[in-house]
Image: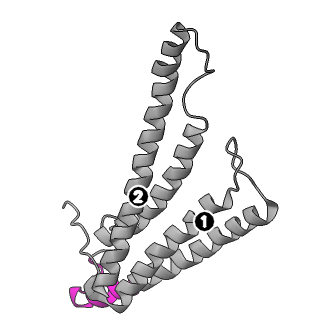
Amino acid sequence: MRWLFAAWHRLECGIAVAALSAIALLLIGDVAGRELLAPLLRRFGVEMGAGGIFGAQKMAVYLMVLAVYCGIGIAVVTGTQLVPRVGFGWLPARWAPWVARISDALGGVALLVAGGYALVLVDATLRTGVRMPILGGPLWPVQLMVPLGLWSAALRYLGYAVWPGLRPPLPQAPA
C-alpha cells in the first residue's frame, strides 16, 4: 500500500508541476508577444494585432484549477495541510492513535461528500452545455478537477484511517 500511495503522490506532483510550468510558459509567451515581438514587428511594418497568445490568461486560470486541486492531495500526503489546533490535548495522550484514525475517517467522509456536491456542479455544467469564456471549449472537464482533487484527499484520509502507518506526522505547532 505504501508503494501505491507513493506512486499516487508522484503522479499528482507531476501533474501539478506540468500545470504550473505550462502557466509560466503561457504567461511569459503572452507578455513577450505583446511587449516585445509585436512592437518589434510593427517597426518593420508587420502588423500582427495585439500580439501575445490568444486566451493565455484564461488557459492559465484553468491550469491553476488543475494545480490547486492536485495540491490538496499533495498537502495531505506531506502533512502540510491546515490543521486547527483547537482541542489538541483535551483527551489523554494514550487515545491519540484512535483519535487520529477517527479524525482521518471523518475527514475522508467529509471530503467524499464535498466531492459529491462538486460532481453535481460538473453534471449541471455538462447537461447545460456551458462553454469556457473566450476559448469556447466545454467547461466541465476543467470543473471535473474539483471533485477528483477532493476525492483524492478523501481516499488518502480513509487510507490513513485503515493503515495508520501511512499517515505523515503533523507539523509541530510553535508553543
Identify the disc placed on residue 16. Answer: 2
Asked if residue 92 is among those painted magenta in the image, a careful observer would answer: yes
Identify the disc placed on residue 144. Answer: 1
Say which element carries label 1.
Answer: loop
What residue is rendered at 45% in x and 81% in y? 155
Camera-nearest residue between 128 and 44: 44
Camera-nearest residue between 86 and 17: 17
What residue is rendered at 45% in x and 19% in y? 36
Say which element carries label 2.
Answer: helix
Task: Point out the image quarter for the C terminus.
Answer: bottom left
When asked about the image quadrant of residue 102, the answer is: bottom left
**Secondary structure mainly formed by the magenta segment:** helix
Task: Point out the image quarter for the N terminus.
Answer: bottom left
- Residue 144: give x, y in percent of width and height: 60, 65
Asked if residue 39 is among those painted magenta in the image, a careful observer would answer: no
- Residue 167: give x, y in percent of width and height: 29, 80
Q: Is residue 149 visible?
A: yes
Identify the disc placed on residue 152. Answer: none
Q: Is residue 168 left or right of residue 60?
A: left
Callout 2 amino acid: Ala
Query: Colour mode?
Result: one colour
- Residue 32: give x, y in percent of width and height: 45, 26
Q: Is residue 99 left or right of residue 55?
A: left
Q: Is residue 140 above or below residue 92?
A: above
What residue is rendered at 61% in x and 15% in y? 47
Q: Please state the extent of the stretch shown in magenta in the rendering.
A: 89-103
